[in-house]
Image (tube, rainbow, N blue to C red):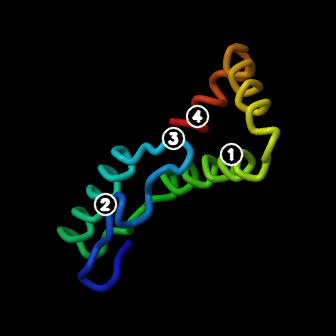
Amino acid sequence: MEFGNIFLTGDAAGLIYNFTGEGIYPAMISGEEAGRKIIDPGHRVSMSGILKEKRSQNRVMEVFVKSGPLKRFLYELMVVVIKRKIFRNKMIKIFT
């Protein structure tokens, strides 16, 4: 996200989650990190949490894209899984 004195944040840095299309939170975090880096050039930018969430959602999206005719079944399965309390928190962490 940093190229000399140019900083890419949010959408420009490719931080939109492909599965949910959400991008406000990553944009805010990346903007804050860029601001900290401008104020304190020694600041070490940390986007690991955002990138981990993005990778998780990208893996789920890849499964859906490659599933072809099974796509509808997978969507239905996801709804059933989310309704189960034991899996709900794990699914929420993946998609938020």
Q: Quadrant of the N terminus?
A: bottom left
Vertically, is 86 above or below 33? above
> Could you tell which of marks 2 and 1 lies nearer the N-terminus?
2
**Residue position for label 3:** 20
Q: Secondary structure at mark 3?
A: loop
Q: Residues within 10 Å of mark 3 (few under 14, many from 20)?
A: few
Q: What amino acid does circle 4 point to? A: Lys
Residue 55 position, x and y percent, is: 61, 55
Please state which of the two labelled residues, at mark 4 or mark 3, is closer to the viewer: 3
Residue 76 position, x and y percent, is: 73, 24
Please identify the residue farthest to the front as the structure is shown. 69
> Could you tell which of marks 1 and 3 lies nearer the N-terminus?
3
Q: CA distance from mark 1 to mark 3?
A: 11 Å
**Residue position for label 4:** 93
Q: CA distance from mark 2 to mark 1?
A: 27 Å
**Residue position for label 2:** 33
**Residue position for label 1:** 60
Is 50 left, or right, of 23 in this rendering?
right
User: Residue drawn at (66%, 30%), measured in percent from left and top?
Assistant: 90
